[in-house]
Amino acid sequence: MNLLKKSLSVLAVAAMAVSLAGCGGSSSSSKSTESGEKVFRFGQSNPKVGLDMQTNTTSGASSVADNVLEGLYRWNDDNKEECVLAKDMPEVSDDGLTYTITLKKGVKFSDGSDLTTEDVKYTFERMFTPATGCTNTYMYNMITGAQDMLDGKATELSGFETVDDYTFKLHINYKFAPFVANLGMDYASIYPSDACAAAGENWGKGTNLIGTGPYVIKENDEQTKVVMVPNKKYHGKKPNLDRLEIVYIDDASTKMMEYEQGNIDMCDLDTSLLDQYKDGDLKDEITQVTPLGTYFLSIKDNDPVLSNKAVREAISLAINRKELCSTVLNGAAEPASSFLNPGVPGHDDKLKTYEHNVKKAKQVLADAGISNPTFTCKVRQKEEKIATALQAYLKEAGMEVQLFEGVEPDPSVETVMKGAKAMTDFQPDVIVAIGGGSPIDAAKAMWAFYEYPEVTFEQLCTPFSFPKLRQKAKFVAIPSTSGTATEVTAFSVITDYAKGIKYPLADFEITPDVAIVDPQLVESLPIKQVAYTGMDALTHAIEAYVSTLNSPFTDPLAIKAIEMVLDYLPQSYKCDMDAREQMHYAQCLAGQAFSNALLGIVHSMAHKTGAAFSTGHIPHGCANAIYLPYVIKYNAHEPEAMHRYADIARRVGLGGTSEKAQVNALIAKIEEFNRAMNIPKTLQEFGVKEDEFKEKLSSIAELAVGDACTGSNPRSITPEQMEKLFTCTYYGTEVDF
């Protein structure tokens, strides 16, 4: 199955045009700092695979590596192959089996070493060394001796013939027309033999990537960003940029927020968010491009089921490519007839897309005597929606497929109902929810509708009104973020995007039966998620401690969680893995505290504003972090609340001789954390428009007062007071009422 991919990018308006060397020389935008430094920041998901192009096929890694590394040849913007490290195009023998290539002289790697034939030889022999684990050997294994190396029968590539320091020959086993084209792929980037060998398994990690390209890696924490600066030894034209940053942001909504706030200059726009932005303020900044890429199913031909030609034919017949493109991919793709997409040399316009014919697919299986074939598909997280659609297509044709499915950030009512239907169709005995708060929350709600399909969403919105669950299934939760603690709580938050409201569902029935809290799952969290989820955990613990339902059983959990967050969140934000582990435990403690003591109006306010404004979604943890200092000031007018806030300050070692001073010290600490992690202080700073805020103020205030979390807040609040409090959070004014 092939689908021609189209992507959507957001382009920043900037002062000057630059060329991103290694990215086809395409024109984009950059910004000049006060010092005159030309900087460009691109936001993308973290590939999490390192930067060694021999061991991965990830475009996210190549966006970095292609600016540092070069190959013998490359493809330019006109889809023409041009010389880079090679002096000329290869001389090909009459029989088409020998390619003679001469290197340019005087080319140096960024470490100062000279490029020679030895480096090219080392690169290709490393590619075929089994210990390397190269994923792209099939593109080059026609070189004589390659298979012997792959099989462990040889340690040198017999098909590589050194003529001199700058000339070599490649001998191949059979004529292969795309061979030179493959030499222009980034998988054949040339590595410096000495430096690469010295780095060993660390090659492609941190700053251990040395090439002949226009940039060198100055910083790379592998979690948040890669910083590149010009290679002073570059053999080509000097790059236009003084600093090129690849900023890792996995969450699509967060990435757009960073773009809107000017923290990045360009990013890809997830097609799921296109409708949200295409007619808004950013409509003129959105451009659609067609990269050379395909979605495809890679089939193991040695699989006992998939090795049968009839099964493969039935799969292709069952897939509705046109529908996938128009619905799941939001019209940002078109059915493809082959791997060679339009614009690629060799593309044949006469080829037709494989027909969609479920009846014929069933007949093909029947004729082959095959009934209900089953197999498992492994999919990348980004393609889970596609995989879900494929599962439905194949099931219609009589083929059962087991898939891991995800949900969108801040799951919608629609997603919950769709998931409940899937559960009803599948009839699971155990529900395992893996991921952040969103998939686990969604799974909880799906669980309820699976066991009680006649229940309405409106009924479940009433706190502690759920029917008795576990009539059909048990529930296991495995969190991959450190903040929501939904794996141990009686809560779920579902968003009604049509109304712009988040609904907190509350009932002890939806507390998971089993929670697996594994800190290894949060090691790769982007720092924005570290910040937001960390402040979410802190808010949980503080609100639980001052809640009207606090008790001697919840207080120790809440205080310990607060202590741990204050101790470990800053280092977790800086990618300290030991701190990440402690934060994962801290958020779970906070969850146990608030699941029993409940929460307060910080959460009430966050629930009702997260999806309320046209300027974009406010991540839940970010909203909590903004509101928390203002709510503490409001609640502290109640003597018992002031006493408990002061008690928190004393227990964590903050200063102050009076309770008022101790409360102020606690507020100052929270604001210090927010500043250190670049969290806005106000809704205005976040980007909410003033006119829209004023227009919706009365409505969101009333909804917040009616939120399920308001009842356990230590100080009562009226809609009028809530309006005043929201106003303080918008402008940053003092809470003096």
Image (cartoon, rainbow, N blue to C red):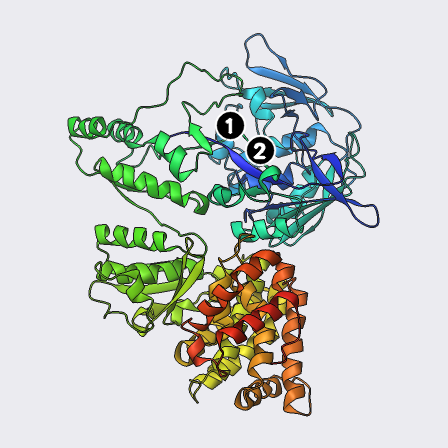
Looking at marks 2 and 1 on the same chain, the residue that comes earlier in the sequence is marked by 1
**SS assignment at label 2:** helix
- 271, above or below 71, in the image: below
Residue under the point 49% across and 58% down:
612
Q: Which residue is mark 2?
A: 187
Picture coordinates of residue 382, whole percent (x, y): 46, 45
Q: Quadrant of the C terminus?
A: bottom right
Q: Is residue 251 visible?
A: no
Amino acid carrying mark 2 in the image: Tyr
Toward the bottom, the furthest residue is: 657
Amino acid carrying mark 1 in the image: Met
Picture coordinates of residue 347, whole percent (x, y): 48, 18
Residue under the point 67% across and 47% down:
208
Q: Is 371 left or right of 694, judged from the image as shown?
A: left
| Total marks in image | 2
- Name the foreground residue: 322 vs 143: 322
Callout 2 environment at 10 Å: few (<14), some (14 to 19), or many (20+)? many
Q: Is 332 left or right of 183, judged from the image as shown?
A: left
Dot 2 and dot 1 residues touching (CB under 8 Å): yes
Cα separation, mark 2 vs mark 1, equals 9 Å
Residue 354 quadrant = top left
Residue under the point 54% across and 87% down:
638
Callout 1 environment at 10 Å: few (<14), some (14 to 19), or many (20+)? some
Picture coordinates of residue 7, whole percent (x, y): 52, 35
Picture coordinates of residue 319, whole percent (x, y): 31, 32
- 476, above or below 93, in the image: below
- 192, above or below 651, in the image: above
Give the number of the disc on residue 139: 1
Residue under the point 42% across and 72% down:
706
- Name the foreground residue: 368 vs 270: 270
**SS assignment at label 1:** helix
Q: Is residue 594 visible?
A: yes
